Image (cartoon, rainbow, N blue to C red):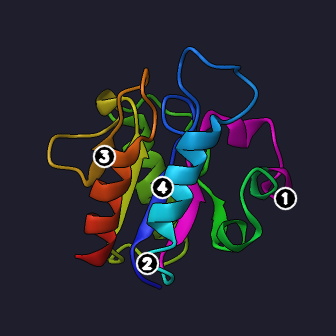
Amino acid sequence: MGRVVFLDFDGVLRRTTSNPSRFDADCLENFEGAIRQCPVSKIVITSTWRLAMSLKELRGLFSPDVAARIVGVTPENFEEETYERHAEILAFLAARNVASLPWVAIDDDASYFPPGAPVLITDPARGFDADCAARLAGLLRA
């Protein structure tokens, strides 16, 4: 399956200063360009948008070829966790019996992850820029 990419939206595909209900076109373009460089990688949505939209609606936000690689959303974690998003990712992997698969998360909030976790942190004011795209492409090829 390749590396699994766990994707946040706010601060990643949508800058914090942008319209709260849609992606910034350049951020989406940078992400899709990077993910296309590793066709076997799959995408799982970690964004809180997953709580308000169906998987079909979430896929509709992406180009068809990238949308086809979105395999699900992380479960909502109802327990108090120190590293909430990390716990949701581990729960997703465990539920599918693929806990050993390599993965990377893309998020703008490092506090959701323990030190050393495989996470690409974005600047929420800049979103997923060309530098992030290059870093992701490198991680996916590794």
Task: Describe the element under mark 3 as helix, strand or loop.
Answer: helix
User: Mark 4 or mark 2, which has the lower sequence index?
Assistant: 4
Chain-order first, disc 1 or disc 3: 1
Residue 68 is covered by the magenta coloring: no
Tell which tag, 2 or 1, sits nearer the viewer.
2
Tell me the kind of residue under disc 2: Cys
Tell me which numbered mark, 4 or 3, is placed earlier along the sequence.
4
Give whichever of discs 2 and 3 has the lower sequence position. Answer: 2
Separation of marks 4 and 3 at Cα, in angstroms: 18 Å
Give the CA distance from mark 2 to mark 3: 17 Å
Q: Which residue is depicted at the point 44% across and 41% down?
A: 128
For residue 17, the mark is none
CB atoms of marks 1 and 3 within 8 Å: no
Using the numbered discs, state the Cα–Cα distance from disc 2 to disc 1 in whole angstroms. Answer: 23 Å
The circle on residue 131 is: 3
Inter-mark Cα distance, 1 to 4: 17 Å
Query: Hey, what amino acid is under mark 3?
Result: Asp
**Circle 4 residue:** 6
Q: Which mark is residue 56?
A: 1
Q: Which quadrant would residue 114 be assigned to in this image?
A: top left
Q: Nearer the viewer, residue 127 or 81?
A: 127
Locate residue 76, reporting x and y percent: 61, 42
Residue bounds of the magenta highlight:
41-57
Of pointers 1 and 4, the one earlier in the residue sequence: 4
Q: Residue furthest top?
A: 17
Which amino acid lies under the numbered mark 1 shown in the image of this protein? Lys
The 10 Å Cα crowd at callout 1, few under 14, some 14 to 19, many 20 or more, is few
Q: Write down the residue under mark 2.
A: 38
Q: Quadrant of residue 69?
A: bottom right
Give whichever of discs 2 and 1 has the lower sequence position. 2
The answer to whether residue 86 shows anywhere in this view is yes
Residue at disc 4, secondary structure: strand
